[in-house]
């Protein structure tokens, strides 16, 4: 029996996969302590499965503790120790701006203010020590005077020469045994001081918060008789809770990464290796791309305006979810999000005291949700409350109620289309060659409109689309990653040096995972000598040499920039390795009842009311229908506008094709 639990902004989803069955449950996400909502969702799933906690063999968990703390700028009281003269690295940043012409746009304030930055009298050069770290115990005493809850240590060139960081880490452990310490060569291990410092600062500030949460979760799990949870990492693999608590920066994309794992599973089971995926929940929409059956990865990205130089699933997030609040801006325009009604009070139609119009309220008024049937999680919908909330906004905008509701949905769709363009068109991918995978509680409601905007002709909606991220957690691999800047060029770049560096990283990652025989994927960041940035080459043979790396790099360089230069030396800058133990195989159609009730109701598409067919339940494989229609699945609702036809494949996935 496999258990996956995903914490979202509105609901916490649980999936139990056992004996050819998939059992699901939802519970409202608890604001103060997410573990309470997690245990409530697990209890509901076990009750539905008529199972006991002792039957569970694997408990996989994706959460938003680190994500929320980072976005809100909350963290433990942290001290930053940097090489003397470089204490303000996290403040200086880079010259690049997110918006070229917004000269006054503010950046997020560093998590460590200037008074809590300490200079370490030391210096490393390319060949080792230039200035010894004389008295690490005295420096630890200076740090202790700031009464920290966490310490981030970022010394120059520690990615190549970590001796001073290790010595200072040992001194801090002696002086402050109960204080979390993050050493940059352990967290990041690559060059570029600003990104390494910013990542280590995030890791230190968030790790005590995540450790407290995981301690509570472990206590609840032990009391309930559940196995120790495995925690989803931003890289898309599961890891032990002890590793997650030690390095919270590794879990910043923990929740969305579960959806990415599920997307790869759908690509495999549906035999459609190229997918553009969007997961629309209550507060946000997460977008990723699956190419040739694998989710695209990145060596780093910004989250909440803060760079994280870590291997992670390539996901782009926008504040467009079912609970996103619609509002009138000072110029009189209709806007949607990024603020969300969240789990409490939630959309106005939830009847929990919310009085602001949201995307869910708009979908209810357009007939795409049924006021006479509860949503997943047992939420009864209050149409009168939704009407009152939308009417207030419509009056302020001078619109009719339905026109306002359509405007809310259209603007939310535009935000999501923009996110999909960032991950496709802006990265040289033609979305028309891909199928659109829609999941999350609200995703399938908006899939056809988004596909139409992007010229896509095929939509996939899995039977468990409303809890697909939790299902992905249960099926996820176990992974450990390691990366090191090696700067191999000229005479130093030999097959032997490349092999030696690669083997060291694979061995370290295998030891972290505790799986010496696990499969290893190795990637190389390569550039022509003299270039400032690298390209990452992957999928090379395990025993590849310099010639193989050069050929792959030049092919990629020509594809990306239109030329190659056989006369210029290459430089292998960084080697990244991921050690993988494959997850269990899951059947997406497990437990599908094939029971489906048919009825009709009025649904508004493109400003026109349509007498639409409504399929409630789980359509059986081989079943067909045509739009206008609404498919009310157990945890999500699929809107099928006129011009689309649907069929159900052998895995229970609904496949929509544009006529």
Image: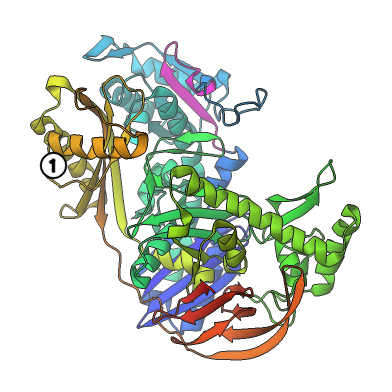
Look at the numbered disc 1 and give the secondary structure of its residue: loop
- Residue farthest toward the left in the current orientation of the protein: 496
**427 to the left or right of 100:** left
Residue 526 placement: quadrant: top left
Q: Is residue 564 visible?
A: yes
Does 60 appear above or below 573?
below
Does 222 appear above or below 72?
below
The colour scheme applied to this rendered structure is: rainbow
Residue 577: say if magenta: no
Q: Is residue 43 visible?
A: no
Residue 78: say if magenta: yes
Point out residue 172 in the picture as x, y percentages from the top left corner: 38, 26
Give 570 or 355, whichever is nearer the viewer.
570
The magenta segment: 75-91
**Quadrant into which the C terminus falls:** bottom right
Q: Residue at x 42, y 64 (%)?
A: 262
Instruction: Identify the residue position indicated by label 1 in the image.
Output: 544
**Quadrant into which the N terminus falls:** bottom left
**30 to the left or right of 570:** right
């Amino acid at each position: 029996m496999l258990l996956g639990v995903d914490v979202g902004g509105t609901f916490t989803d649980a999936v139990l996969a056992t004996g050819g069955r998939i059992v699901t449950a939802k519970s409202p996400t608890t604001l103060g302590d997410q573990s309470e909502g997690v245990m409530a969702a697990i209890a509901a799933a076990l009750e539905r499965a008529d199972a006991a906690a002792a039957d569970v063999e694997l408990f996989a968990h994706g959460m938003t503790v680190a994500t929320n703390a980072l976005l809100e700028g909350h963290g433990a009281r942290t001290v930053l120790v940097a090489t003397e003269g470089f204490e303000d690295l996290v403040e200086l940043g880079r010259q690049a701006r997110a918006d070229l012409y917004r000269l006054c746009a503010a950046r997020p304030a560093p998590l460590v203010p200037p008074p809590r930055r300490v200079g370490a009298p030391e210096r490393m050069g390319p060949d080792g020590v230039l200035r010894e770290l004389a008295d690490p115990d005295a420096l630890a005493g200076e740090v202790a005077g700031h009464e920290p809850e966490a310490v981030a240590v970022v010394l120059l060139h520690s990615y190549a020469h970590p001796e001073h960081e290790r010595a200072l880490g040992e001194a801090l452990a002696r002086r402050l045994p109960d204080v979390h310490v993050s050493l940059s060569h352990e967290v990041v291990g690559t060059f570029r001081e600003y990104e390494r410092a910013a990542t280590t600062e995030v890791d230190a500030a968030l790790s005590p918060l995540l450790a407290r949460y995981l301690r509570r979760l472990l206590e609840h799990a032990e009391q309930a008789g559940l196995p120790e949870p495995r925690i989803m990492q931003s890289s898309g693999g599961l890891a032990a809770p002890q590793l997650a608590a030690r390095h919270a920066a590794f879990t910043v994309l923990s929740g969305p990464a579960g959806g990415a794992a599920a997307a790869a599973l759908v690509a495999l089971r549906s035999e459609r290796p190229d997918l553009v995926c969007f997961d629309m929940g209550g507060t946000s929409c997460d977008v990723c791309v699956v190419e040739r059956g694998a989710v695209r990865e990145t060596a780093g990205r910004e989250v909440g305006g803060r760079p994280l130089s870590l291997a992670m699933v390539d996901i782009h997030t926008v504040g467009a979810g079912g609970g996103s609040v619609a509002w009138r801006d000072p110029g009189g325009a209709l806007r949607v999000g990024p603020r969300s009604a969240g789990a409490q009070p939630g959309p106005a139609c939830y009847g929990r005291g919310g009085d602001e119009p949201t995307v869910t309220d708009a979908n209810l008024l357009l007939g795409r949700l049924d006021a006479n049937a509860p949503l997943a999680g047992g939420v009864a919908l209050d149409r009168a409350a939704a009407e009152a909330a939308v009417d207030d906004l419509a009056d302020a905008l001078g619109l009719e109620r339905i026109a306002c509701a359509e405007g809310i949905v259209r603007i939310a769709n535009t935000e999501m289309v923009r996110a999909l363009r960032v991950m496709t068109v802006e990265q040289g991918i033609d979305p028309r060659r891909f199928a659109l995978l829609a999941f999350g509680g609200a995703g399938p409601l908006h899939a056809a409109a988004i596909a139409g905007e992007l010229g896509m002709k095929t939509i996939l909606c899995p039977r468990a689309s409303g809890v697909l991220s939790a299902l992905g957690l249960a099926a996820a691999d176990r992974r450990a990653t390691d990366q090191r800047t090696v700067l191999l060029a000229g005479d130093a770049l030999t097959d032997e040096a490349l092999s030696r560096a690669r083997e060291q990283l694979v061995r370290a990652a295998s030891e972290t995972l505790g799986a010496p025989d696990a499969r290893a994927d190795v990637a190389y960041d390569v550039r022509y000598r003299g270039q400032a940035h690298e390209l990452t080459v992957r999928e090379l043979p395990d025993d590849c040499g310099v010639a193989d790396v050069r050929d792959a790099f030049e092919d990629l360089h020509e594809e990306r920039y239109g030329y190659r230069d056989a006369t210029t030396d290459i430089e292998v800058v960084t080697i990244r390795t991921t050690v993988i133990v494959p997850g269990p195989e899951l059947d997406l159609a497990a437990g599908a009842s094939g029971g489906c009730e048919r009825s009709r109701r009025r649904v508004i598409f493109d400003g026109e009311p349509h007498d639409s067919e409504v399929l409630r339940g789980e359509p059986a494989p081989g079943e067909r229908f045509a739009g206008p229609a609404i498919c009310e699945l157990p945890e999500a609702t699929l809107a099928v506008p006129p011009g689309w036809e649907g069929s159900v494949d052998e895995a229970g996935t609904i496949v929509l094709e544009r006529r």
